[in-house]
Amino acid sequence: MEKPRQNWAGLANISFGFFGIQIGFALQNANMSRIFQTLGASMDDLPWLWAAAPLTGLLIQPIIGHMSDRTWLGKLGRRRPYFLAGAVLAALSLLLMPLSGALLMAAMLLWMLDASLNISMEPFRAFVGDMLRKDQHTAGYAVQTAFIGAGAVAGSLFPWLLDHWGVSNEAVGGGIPDTVRYAFWVGGAALFAAVLWTVLTTQEYSPEQQRAFDDAAEHDTADSTAALAQRGSGAAFWWIGSGAALAFLTQRAGLEKEVYLLAALLIGYGLISHVAIRLARAGRPASMLTSIVGDFSGMPPIMKRLALVQFFSWSALFIMWFNTTPIVAKHFFGATDTTSAAYQDGGNWVGVLFATYNGVAALAALFVLPVLSAQLGKARTHMVGLLAGAAGYASFFVIKDPQWLILSEVGVGIAWASILAMPYAILASSLPQAKLGIYMGLFNVFVVVPQLLVATVMGSIMKLFFPGEPIWTMAFAAGTLVLAALAMTRVSVPGET
């Protein structure tokens, strides 16, 4: 049997919920530092407060992926229960966040918000693969990427629009301004409505129907716990040793204290792996722990190769997100004082640049990626997108007028569209459908680890080699995207030459 072909309305219904989810992420990314500082946090406190976000994704997504693969709630389906539960919790978090009266409350709500967004987001990646036939995977993830771009633009610009519509952007006597309050409340309503639209307009295939489709029988879905029992504990001790060595180096070399977080993660994964291997060898029944560790250590070859591409790609993105504001403010507006009017002008222009690349990504996903994929194949299309992003980052060294940075963001937008669409289209066409949820969740590890690496290591590198010159981070970003494009040469997509 072949899955029915979806028209454009069907493709839109499948991914429309992501529009609301991305509004939530955009409001979080653009405003949480502002909320934390309003409630008394210092600049030194921000990395620790923000650490909850990537750590939550790292833990939540594999768990939700594993659970959703094994869920079936009748008419509500397999993935949609998680869409709905996450949307309810995320909307509640967005409602309460502007009412925070203390820093601890805001930090706890950030954890709740990020956990909720991840609960909804992870199954959406697998949902596209569940619902579409292989020849529509590129189109499906392209439409999803378009909604991501549109949601990011809407969530990023809404507080700015409220300010221009006369809503107060200052809180008299301290607190959180009305622009942020109303943006969070409207964003929460929009998130819930968008996810509810997908829940009500789609109907998932039952487990029996999925087994009847040809692509469900093309892969070996043997129990990963049994395979884990055959592995030694050497790799687990290697992770533990690497974490301990990194912690020792951090202490001896005086690296940024956030590097300890990365070391703790390495040690933690090593310990968890060791426990899982011992349980599997003891003949214990398969559990969530042994299944997740077994699936991670036994990833299919194509997923391992794409994971390297993903690692380099997201390293470049996080470098951009962390450093674009100080780069633009210093090198294009001549400002380093964060309280100066010129610095604020630079920050405002960065908001326009980010809205530009998200808008370009939405258009490129719909009108560029499907055409290129049909002509070049998924792998080469992704290489083209990554190199376009590298050119965009490198152009920061050539352009002198900040207005022309719009052209740089065109290249970045094409790369962003490709990063959000092409790896997932390749995976959905190459992985066992019965494990699509857990593999998509584990693939997120290679999104989170670069974020932690950039947040912890890049600061130490810049202080050591390029103190006071943040523009050199763009050279690192361009270089890592070139490495990602080179790594794509090792990815062979089934059915493509």
Image: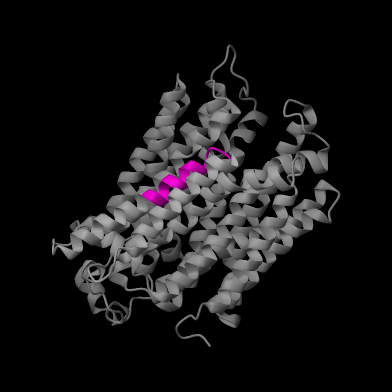
Residue 414 seen in the current view? no
Residue 226 placement, left or right of 271? left
Q: Which residues are magenta?
A: 256-267
Is residue 488 depicted above or below 82 in this figure?
below
Residue sticking out furthest to the top: 173
Give the quarter of the image for residue 435: bottom left
Residue 36 placement, left or right of 195? right
Indicate the colouring scheme: one colour
Is residue 262 depicted above or below 107 in this figure?
below
The reply to whether the magenta stretch includes residue 408 is no
Camera-side residue: 268 or 252? 252
What's the magenta bit mostly, secondary-structure-wise?
helix
Q: Residue at x 63, y 50 (%)?
A: 319
Camera-side residue: 70 or 213? 70
Where residue 399 appears, as percent x and y from the top left, is 83, 54
Is residue 431 depicted above or below 273 in this figure?
below
